[in-house]
Image: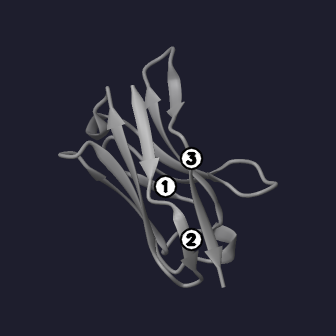
């Protein structure tokens, strides 16, 4: 089972970026998926989660600006980031819930740098 995140890079304040997370060895449509981020000097925090049924839970700081979506055909999850702010800078991680006893698994991070 593997998660491969991509799409990070530099972006200007107010701009947009789309992160992708390609899954292998599991079925995204049947799995709760998450995007987390870790800003410099801060703890990793939940950005958004989406359940297997499509229910979403956004952090207050990104609600209305970020959108999570699944593409079942591509077995991937995306994070559309709009109106980005400097505080959105960080390493973004894709995660998924696996059955007990495995629990939550993580992909490698992708760095997003927002500059003015």
Q: Residue 7: image x %, image y %? A: 44, 59
Q: How far apart are marks 3 and 2 (CA)?
A: 15 Å
Q: Disc 1 vs disc 3: Cβ atoms closer than 8 Å? A: no
Quarter of the image where one finds residue 40: bottom right
- Between 33 and 51, the one nearer to me in the picture: 33
Query: Callout 2: helix, strand or loop?
Result: strand
Read off the residue under disc 3. 109
Q: Say left or right for 89 vs 6.
A: right
Between discs 3 and 2, the one toward the N terminus = 2
Q: How far apart are marks 1 and 3 (CA)?
A: 20 Å
Q: Please give the name of the residue rendered at 22% of the width and 46% of the height, measured from the top-left corner.
A: 74
Between discs 1 and 2, the one toward the N terminus = 2
Q: Say left or right for 10 vs 115.
A: left
80 shown above or below 55: below
The N terminus: image quadrant: top left
Quarter of the image where one finds residue 112: bottom right
Q: Residue 52: image x %, image y %? A: 33, 40
Query: Callout 1: helix, strand or loop?
Result: strand
**Residue 57, which numbered label?**
1
Query: Callout 3: helix, strand or loop?
Result: loop
Select label 3 or label 2 by which is in front: 2
Select label 1 or label 3 by which is in front: 3
- Can see residue 60? no
109 shown above or below 88: above
101 shown above or below 77: above
């Amino acid at each position: 089972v593997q998660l491969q995140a991509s799409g990070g890079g530099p972006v200007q304040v107010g701009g947009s970026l789309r992160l992708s997370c390609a899954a292998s060895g599991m079925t995204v449509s049947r799995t709760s998926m998450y995007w987390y981020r870790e800003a410099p000097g801060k703890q990793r925090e939940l950005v958004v989660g989406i359940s297997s049924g499509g229910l979403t839970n956004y952090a207050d700081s990104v609600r209305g600006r970020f959108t999570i979506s699944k593409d079942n055909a591509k077995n991937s999850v995306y994070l559309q980031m709009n109106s980005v702010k400097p505080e959105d800078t960080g390493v973004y991680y894709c995660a998924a819930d696996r059955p007990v006893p495995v629990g939550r698994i993580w992909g490698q991070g992708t760095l997003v740098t927002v500059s003015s």
